[in-house]
Amino acid sequence: MILKRKIHKAKQALYHRGCLNSSLSQSSPRLLKHLFSLKTFSGEVSLTDPHSLKHKNIFKNYGRAICNFIVSNIGEEYSTLITDRLKVTMEQIKNYVHQSKENLNGSQGFLEFFLKRENDSAELLELKEAVARLGIIFIKYFSVNWIIHSKLLYKLDYLKCRSKILKMIQLSRNNLSS
């Protein structure tokens, strides 16, 4: 019943904007559901093109998947190799991941998670280096399995963005920005 109301509101909005012609107004609700995804904000209906939704949460989802990998048992095995070389402990890495996980809402938050700044402390630089190395391990060896076995709608787009995200992590790991 709720979906019918949303479709009706969407039809009305399209009709008033002049976007809806008579042939589309007579089409089935199933067709309209596939043409547009509906979002409600305080009772209003806004229409979003489905093609723009493909890349909406890529950075957020990859960032959270990297965080979950670092905290998991498999990530701990890899982090022991990394913490031996760096001056950080696994507890420090987990605390940094838990603090930063909430800020991974887009590309800017994703970059801030890895990007080394000149005014960062030596400990924070070591933490970002460890997280970047673990992120690279996740992207290279575990991300395909995560994508294929997840509930993501645009799996092919996530696979295509793998190399771009890997490059972003590698560049942020190598560069020190102000």
Image (cartoon, rainbow, N blue to C red):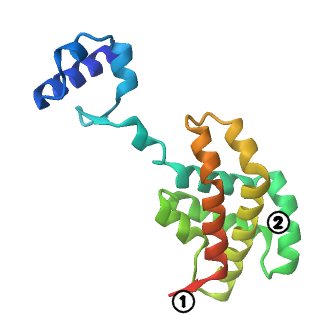
Residue 165 placement (x, y as % from top left): 61, 60
Amino acid, disc 1: Asn
- At a point 70% along the width and 68% down the height, the residue shown is 131
Along the viewing direction, whichever of 38 and 95 lies nearer the viewer: 38
Along the viewing direction, whichever of 81 and 97 lies nearer the viewer: 81
Residue 20 placement (x, y as % from top left): 19, 23
- Give whichever of discs 2 and 1 has the lower sequence position: 2
Q: Secondary structure at mark 1?
A: loop
In this rendering, would 99 be left or right of 50?
A: right
- At a point 75% along the width and 42% down the height, the residue shown is 145
Q: Disc 1 marks which residue? A: 119
Answer few, some or many: residues within 10 Å of disc 2's Cα (few below 14, many 20 plus, some between 14 and 19). Answer: many
Q: CA distance from mark 2 to mark 1?
A: 25 Å
In this rendering, would 120 be left or right of 130?
A: left
Quadrant assignment, res 24: top left
- At a point 72% along the width and 49% down the height, the residue shown is 143
Amino acid, disc 2: Ser
Residue 26 placement (x, y as % from top left): 24, 10
Q: Disc 2 marks which residue? A: 79
